[in-house]
Image (cartoon, rainbow, N blue to C red):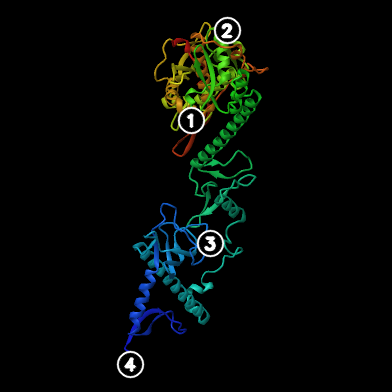
Amino acid sequence: RFPGRPRQVTTRVSAPTASRRSGGMAAAVEIPVAAERAPELAKESVVEGEALLEVVGGGERGGIIVRESRGTTSRELEQRLSTGSVIKAIEREAGRVHFELVSGAGPSSGWVSAQAAGKPLLAPTEKAAAVASDVDAQKARAKALSIYGKRLAEAREANAQSFPGFNRTAFPLWNAEGAHPGVPERVARAQLQRDLGREEADGPEIEEDGADSDGETMTLCVHCRLPLGQIAYAAGDDKGSTALLHGECKAERLLGEMRRQEAERLEREAELKRARREEFDIGWKPTAIPANAAAASKLKCGFEPRGLCCLILRGDHVQVAPTLEPAGGINLEYLSIALQVRRREGTEPLFSLDPVEDGLRPKDPEGAMQMKRFEPEWLAGTSVGEVMFQADYHLKELSMGECEQPIVGMKSVSDHSDADDCKEEWSGREWFVVRKAEMNLSEDQVLIPFLKMGVEAREQVLGRNGLEDAPVTRPNHPLVRYAEAFTHNFDIIAERKSVVCQLREVAKASIVAKFLLEAGVGLEDSWFSLGAQVAGCCLEVPQLWNDRCFSQIRMEDGEVVTAEKARDARVHGVYGGVDFGIDRFR
């Protein structure tokens, strides 16, 4: 068809050859290509690039439908081809495309429609061209790696000495017997233990010697392995030990030993506190929250509540109804106990945790006890009394730093004292209070109590009758600063601490009880007998303590001058309770 001889187009490609005599030199390979064939190759490349398509439809439905075969009635695959995926078109017929997935989410292969309802589902885009370029680059890298691997294999078979990378004798293997003939076994073992970060072997440490560049023998520090100077310290108290240390190394070892002893002390105290918490039932349990189902059945409400309950004012009486609004929710058992306290005593529930011993400094902090004081006394053992005690005790734990603070960056009382370098002893009390109380009525006559709670603190002094509130408490007192921070974040803390949230519910119930009795709302006798009392309530609990120790090592000119360890002699006492103060609101 073509007269004459076809014109040749020569392409030069530099690549490693398979020559066995050349030492890895590259050769040029000439590939003759017919000139008439060159446009066809270019055309095939363009067709292959256009075969990569991007899914542009199906954005609202999570992708386009993929079927098992060419027909539109064939089985539909479970997974759709996501919008934005790139596919390679293998076959096209009557608006249907047989594809392979290149990138994106969807089936690895299948049949899709090129368009639907006149809208294109597939289209060649710049993204498809970029993916095609990446695929070509990956193929090129794989081909180059294959050629290079063959070249190395042939060269290794031909003459391994021409390729130092395959000469395994260039780097001699390590010989355990002849590696360090001059190092004693005990020294090598000690070095290995030190490098691995392990403890020293049992038994006395032995003095180690080394040699300088002149060959003179010198004594080495067993800790840092450096030569000793004019001042050296014994490595341990063992009389059989001849090892010596630098002053700095001795101080580092002493400090590590003090830290270990402090960690052991804290672990012993934590174990003792855990045992006492279990013995005296200290610690709030959400399972102790009374449910409304039992109380609603006693009131004969006509329904079984499965969540919150609210009170609806119907003339001169109230009706219990279910609700989904937390603002109007009331715990019926808390309300019943608050009604009993208000009708019998004419006041609100009150709790305090008082020291058994008089004075600022207890004789035995770890064995000192505190007394639970309830007003009225019959609150002991009730659900309201338990909430008030557990909330107050947890407040003391947070204040003294026994627990992690509920707010990031919030400091404990001990942290404030250390930051201020407060050297004097002090004692104080902090208690929960209600700062604002209101009773609102919604359009559908639902009673909605509103309140703002907080924590107040006062410094205490030793008076004639024991600890009494000081006439003036400085505003920067550590206890006052902690109470202000707690009050500022009270609502957030109530969301994160269940016992604080339940104390707020008790305060809400006290506000509602005060309103119902003062407004003359008619209540049946069953309203005053919903709460159950638990027998055997212990009125004494261990006093919480938190000892802080310090360790100090002072050095001068490389010598250890002092190494002391002692407990902080300052004593800070924190007491308090729950005193809502709702009676001051009218």
Q: Nearer the viewer, mark 1 or mark 3?
A: 3
Which disc number belongs to residue 5?
4
Q: Which residue is mark 3?
A: 75
Q: Amino acid at mark 4?
A: Arg
Q: Secondary structure at mark 4?
A: loop
x, y (%) of residue 59? 41, 54
Does residue 8 appear to the left or right of 510 in the view shown?
left
N-terminal label among 4 and 3 = 4
Q: Amino acid at mark 3?
A: Arg
How far apart are labels 2 and 4 at the CA level?
A: 123 Å
Residue tagged 1: 406
Secondary structure of the residue carrying tag 2 is: helix
Instruction: Using the numbered discs, state the Cα–Cα distance from disc 4 to disc 3 in whole angstroms.
Output: 55 Å
Q: Is residue 566 left or right of residue 91?
A: right
Residue 114 percent location from the top left of the image: 41, 64
- 3D distance between C-alphas at marks 2 and 1: 37 Å
3D distance between C-alphas at marks 2 and 3: 78 Å
Which callout, 2 or 3, points at the residue further toward the start of the chain? 3
Q: Which residue is mark 2?
A: 344
| Label located before the other in sequence (2 or 4) | 4
Packing grade of label 4 (10 A; few <14, some 14-19, many >=20) is few
